[in-house]
Image (cartoon, rainbow, N blue to C red):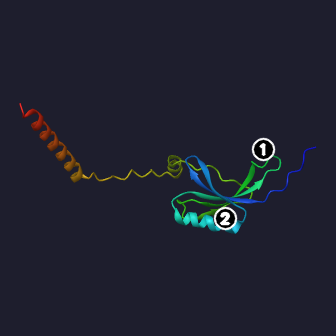
Amino acid sequence: MSPQRPPQPTRFAIQKARGKGWKTLEVGEELSQAKARFDRMVGVNPRAYFRLIQLDYNADSAYEGMEFNWTLIELHDPTKGGPAKGAPGRGAGPLLPTKAVAAKTGRRPKAKEAVALPFRIYLAVVLIGSLAGVLAYLHFAGGR
């Protein structure tokens, strides 16, 4: 007979999208504090994807306190404008890449923004380099 594990409190995690996965930024035990921190993180970086999830301890796991069932509470999607509330018992799916979203919506992705070449700086560097080359040539080859 295996010993019963003590019950674990429900925890709340704030995660940020990183590449194809999610990075956990913070884990807390009170929903009000987690919600306040989530709102602050969204306020600091409104162009990033964030999610607030509820972590429930999985007592049936063989990994002793290392595996949790999670439920989406809130998702911040910067393309939608406002947070999306999660339905109980459902997890959020992976983020779709930009090309997949563009294919679904029928819109083409925006072209990359053109960056102006600093022509004056480029010209100054070329002229200074040329002048240094000419002076080096005159110094070393002119003495013969």
Residue under pointer 1: 63
Q: Which of marks 2 and 1 is nearer the N terminus?
A: 2
Q: Is residue 31 left or right of residue 103?
A: right
Outermost residue on the front side: it is 143
Locate residue 112, reporting x and y percent: 39, 50
Please tell me whether mark 1 sits on a helix, a strand or a loop: loop
Please tell me whether mark 2 sits on a helix, a strand or a loop: helix
Locate residue 58, reporting x and y percent: 79, 50
- Residue 76: quarter of image: bottom right
Locate residue 140, reporting x and y percent: 12, 34
Q: Is residue 22 above or below residue 47?
A: above
Please name whichever residue, 104 or 63, is drawn nearer the observer in this view of the structure. 63
Check the picture and name the quadrant holding the N terminus: top right
Q: Is residue 11 left or right of residue 79?
A: right
- How far, Cα to Cα, is label 2 from label 1? 26 Å
Q: Which residue is drawn at 23% across and 52% down?
A: 121
Residue under pointer 2: 34
**CB atoms of marks 2 and 1 within 8 Å:** no
Locate residue 133, reporting x and y percent: 16, 39
Outermost residue on the right side: it is 1
Residue 114's label in the rendered image is none
Q: In this view, does 30 lie above or below 18?
A: below
- Amino acid type assigned to the residue bearing label 2 in the image: Ala
Q: Is residue 14 left or right of residue 138?
A: right
Label 1: few (<14), some or many (≥20) within 10 Å?
few
- Amino acid type assigned to the residue bearing label 1 in the image: Tyr
Label 2: few (<14), some or many (≥20) within 10 Å?
many
Q: Residue at x 19, y 50 (%)?
A: 124
Q: Residue at x 85, y 51 (%)?
A: 5
Please name whichever residue, 135 or 130, is drawn nearer the observer in this view of the structure. 135
Outermost residue on the top side: it is 144
